[in-house]
Image (spheres, coloured by chain):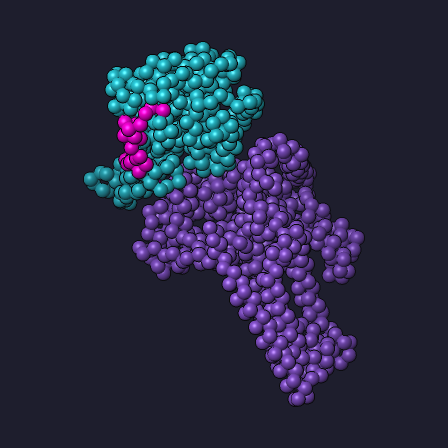
Chain colours: A cyan, B purple
Amino acid sequence: MAETILESQPDLLIDWKKSDRDDGGACDLRTEEMLVNMGPQHPSTHGVLRIVLRTDGELVLEAIPHIGYLHRCAEKIGENLQPFQFVPTTDRLDYLAAMNNNYGFSLAVEKLAGIEVPERARYIRVIMAELSRIASHLVSFGCYGMDLGAFTPFLYAFRERERILDMFEAACGARLTCSYITIGGVTQDLPERFCETVSEFLDYFEPKIDEYNQLLTYNHIFVKRAANVGVISAEDAIRWGLTGPCLRGSGVKFDLRKSLPYDIYSRFDFEVPVGLPGGSDGIPKEVRVGDCWNRYFVRMQEMRQSVRIIRQCLEQMPAGEVKAKLPKTLKLPANEVYFESEGARGQLGFLVVGDGSAIPYRVKVRGPCFCNLSITSHVCREVLLADVPAIIGSIDIVMGEVDR
Amino acid sequence: MRSPWNPAYKDRAIRLFLVLAGLFVAVAGVGWLALSLLGFGREPLVLLLVVIGPLLTGAGMFGTAMVIRHHAVVGGLLKRLALPIFLGGVVGLVVAIWVIALLYQYVDGIEAAQSESARQVFTWFGGPLTVGEIQGYLTGGPATRGGWWGVPAVLLWPLQFQLVRDIIGVVGVVGFVSLVAMVAIWGERKVSADMQSRLGPMRVGGWHGWAQSMADGLKLIQKEDIIMDGADKPLFRLAPYLAFVPALAAFITLPFGTYWIFRNLDVGLIFILAMLGIEVVGVILAGWASNNKWSVYGGMREACQMVSYEIPMGLALLVPVMIAGTLRLTDIGELQSGGFHTWLVFSNPFVFAAAVVYYISSLANCKRAPFDLPEAESELVAGFLTEYSGFRWCLFFFAEYAAMFVVSGLATILFLGAWHSPLPFSWAQAWWGADWSQWTLWQKALGGILFSGPLWFVAKAGFLVWVQMWLRWTLPRIRLDQVMYACVQVLLPVTMVLLLGASFWGLLVKPGTLVAQITNAVLTLIGAFFVAGFFAIAAYGYRHRRRLVGNMSIEALPGA
């Protein structure tokens, strides 16, 4: 017993298994299972996720996610609007990384309609998408600290995120629901001194990542809480269709920007961080590939890679047009296109079916959060109650995208 | 949007107060008339009660009406004077408490000055002194009654009874607990804000939102008292009191100075530990009575956490008790009056370690982060507090902050030199005489600030409370099995070893020997190094506060 507790992954089921036995003599205390409704109004379900927990004391035997509390018929709206009218709706999917959604949808429509995007617009889009990724990962980092009971990192994360949102506001007037990236380019050129502001921010932000790693990532309690919890093996991750940091946290080196480079991502030099076993490169020894800590740490490293990409963009960005010349009503050819891009939370796919008119016949969204969330009931099995927020937080869901 | 404040209310309030003022003035007039007719007009005490009192009350009512009418001017004035009001309040409070203590001494002095024969004349009031005797003492003549000296005599007269002193003491304790809770809640918000590059409360009260807690308290009293249909109503009502009263009761025997104690029990330490132990019942009851699954989780977590951590906490406290040889907290405090190096924490390595163990256990005992599992926000919504709102919730909150101060106070008394400053008290005795009761007033005041006094106790305990806040806003929360692991497999064996080690140390190393002195010196140096390091880092942080905090709170927010 002492040995099992000393390990980070204690055998929590000892008593439970005992009580399951028929002779009844082995256990001195009979316990009853209890169904607990976690959510839809709960501080750590990141929105309106509802999870029904079957618990035995502090032990969670089963966790079943129930979704649909934020369903707003985004796909149906897509069948009734012209593509450029649908762009604002994509903002509301993953509202923490709106630019990435705009970007993915625009790329899909451009591929369907065969639109050539001006060079400058392409770079602006990448800058925006990566800034958006940083902002999204910052929220994820802050919220994850909060899920584990550390409140302060959350406000540090929001302090940096405010600056990114300020830049978005300067570029397009909106902070959260930007709709800046649109079909054929971006809505308007960057404001004056935008590039300088961005590079100032990057210079300020990059050392801060180390600070946050000191504050939270390598914190002993944090490591104890997140390491070796909710371990997802690489096979499981692929089987459940996990993408993004959740997949890479399990050690699978798959990032669409690198593996199947779209748009101009092949021009940039960056790395794809993956989950690593403990003990190497200063990683705490309790850590295992595919646990909550690794999923979290992949995001921290990705922020650094995004900084690298933005720096290269700023260097290479040419002057010129920012939007392709498009007809007033863009007629979509009778064809269909499925395009996936690497969003902040994974592979964000858009299926756009045209029928010759300006309005698509079908728009289907493949939300990464939806697929990532599906593994919850597999991982949240026989864990402690306190691990459930830790696991859900590490999967980093946005309910706007799960429910659409 | 229309303001909820109806201007008609204002006029109605002004009218009400003016009418009341007129009534009181009328009462005073009638009283004066009656006194003149009955021939009592020369008696100052009666005059004071019947005429001057109502007159002053009437003036107060008139003043209130004027304040309401010109509230904008008064508000602006108050805001401009916010800092002086705050500082004046703090200093005034300290002085007021001190004045009461001096008054007690004065009355005792009168008592001692009376001869035995004089005391036997009038004893039917129950006290040793009559008003006449006090008045005689004040005027320096024989025992008389009446005249202007009768007023202070009447006011001083009740102070000789123990019951009156107890009532004043209870009011003082309750007031102090409330004050501690309010200041600590405000402090918690400011500390967290400082750590998170925010500003925290800035508006209420003018100077850094110092009156925010009062405003919150007012709001909480006004809130609807919600009790769930499914709740066990009697227990639901009982639970907050079971949490709050023990926290309050712990202050009964918590000394703030050698003579600054409500009841000096010879088992003071045990009493405080017992009171802290009862508090858990309220929390469990709250969790159960709420009839909410999250609350039950919170209550059960609290139960298992408290029961486990009381053991290392109690054992760690035994280590200094073994050195002191007493459970009376004032005696333990007096042991440490010889300056920084005589603080018990430096007496041997085992006490030094026990201080750390005690502090960790006390965090768990007060449900403070990283042991805040019973109310873990991200896991249990609000734990046992989920269904509580309004003033009942406020009582739990008060109890938490009161308990924080109690455990910090215990740490101060048992480890950190109690109410003594780092300077040895013997210096003061060398300068001003061995018997402090013979010192002059300014010597006593200076001695209280420089050498030993309640201010030092409050400052040290306040510092430890601040450290608790510091930890809370830095660390993530520990999981339940890790909490139990830390207690049962780490702290408990460690405290056992400490207890054993301290016993052997007491047996083998006699005080005053070379080993004891060297250990004491080394530990004192380590302690001094910690203190100096703390101040150095704090000074560095203050010097670079603009760079460290980030630009958001400096550029983006008004009033930074």
Q: Which quadrant: the C terminus of chain B?
A: top right
Q: Is residue B313 left or right of residue B540?
A: left
The answer, for residue B356, to whether it is visible in the render is no
From the top left corner, tell me how far across and down residue B344 is, in percent: 62, 45
Q: Quadrant of residue B543?
A: top right
> For residue B180: magenta?
no
Residue A68 belongs to the span the image colors magenta: yes
Q: The magenta stretch spans which residues? A: A58-84
Tell me what residue is drawn at x 57 percent, y 73 percent: B19
**In the displayed structure, would residue A125 be above or below residue A95?**
above
Kindly identify the residue that appears in the image at 33 percent across and 47 percent down. Answer: B293
- B457 or B542, which lies in front? B542
- The one of B116 and A74 positioned closer to us in this rendering: A74
* Percent x, y of residue A320: 49, 14
Q: Residue at x 39, y 46 (%)?
A: B383
Q: Is residue B114 left or right of residue A95?
A: right
Instruction: From the viewer's side, name the closer residue of B103 and A136.
Output: A136
Q: Residue furthest bottom?
A: B38
> Looking at this rendering, what residue extends furthest in the left direction?
A22
Please name the residue shown 29% across and 33% down the image. A73
Q: Position of residue B417 (x, y in %)?
A: 64, 47
The answer to whether any part of residue B226 appears in the image is yes
